[in-house]
Amino acid sequence: IDRFAPQQKTNYVDLLNTFAVGFYSELDFLNEVQNQKRIRAILVDQDTNKAKNGVYVPKVYDEFCTARLAVTEWIEGKALNEIDDQSIRELIPYAQEAFLTQLLKEGFLHADPHKGNWKAFTSPDDR
């Protein structure tokens, strides 16, 4: 390492250890479902089971979850890569509100926005 960047003072062993802990916690679905339940409590009205600001988070079925399996409520909808650009533009305010609520109000952010984690409801009345 010194040969390429002698001014660099990063402890690469510590860096890799930190990365490894984070990586393995991402692979532990019990940790993931705890995070999902926390985000659900923030974004979904628990009395009505409706999205507070247009973003719905599926329920977790704890009794079926293990470190290698997460079981959640099935949500009908379309993957974001299956909808047109105008529909995407219409969803942006909801995603932005959810993101800013998590980041600025709650201090807890779900930062895994791949297409498997987002679906567009097929009808505005779906949730």
Image (cartoon, rainbow, N blue to C red):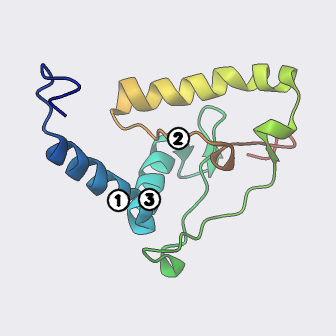
Quick check: marks 2 and 1 in contact, CB under 8 Å?
no
Where residue 121 sits, quadrant-wise, is top right
Residue type beneath disc 3:
Glu
N-term-proximal mark, 3 vs 1: 1
Q: Which mark is residue 43?
A: 2
Q: Nearer the viewer, mark 3 or mark 1?
A: 1
Label 2: element kind: helix
- Give the residue pinned by disc 1: 25
Residue 23, horizontal then vertical, whole percent: 37, 55
Residue at 84% x, 22% y is 85
In-front residue for pair 46/82 = 82
- Give the residue pinned by disc 3: 32
N-term-proximal mark, 2 vs 1: 1
Residue 92, horizontal then vertical, whole percent: 68, 22
In-front residue for pair 85/44 = 85
Residue type beneath disc 2:
Leu
Q: Nearer the viewer, mark 2 or mark 1?
A: 1
Residue type beneath disc 1:
Ser
Considering only vertical position in the picture, is 121 above or below 53? Answer: below
Q: CA distance from mark 3 to mark 1?
A: 8 Å
Q: CA distance from mark 2 to mark 1?
A: 23 Å
Q: The C terminus lies in which quarter of the figure?
A: top right
Considering only vertical position in the picture, is 60 above or below 63? Answer: above
Residue 54, horizontal then vertical, whole percent: 66, 34
Q: Nearer the viewer, mark 2 or mark 3?
A: 3
User: In the image, is 89 to the left or to the right of 123?
Assistant: left
Q: Which mark is residue 17?
A: none
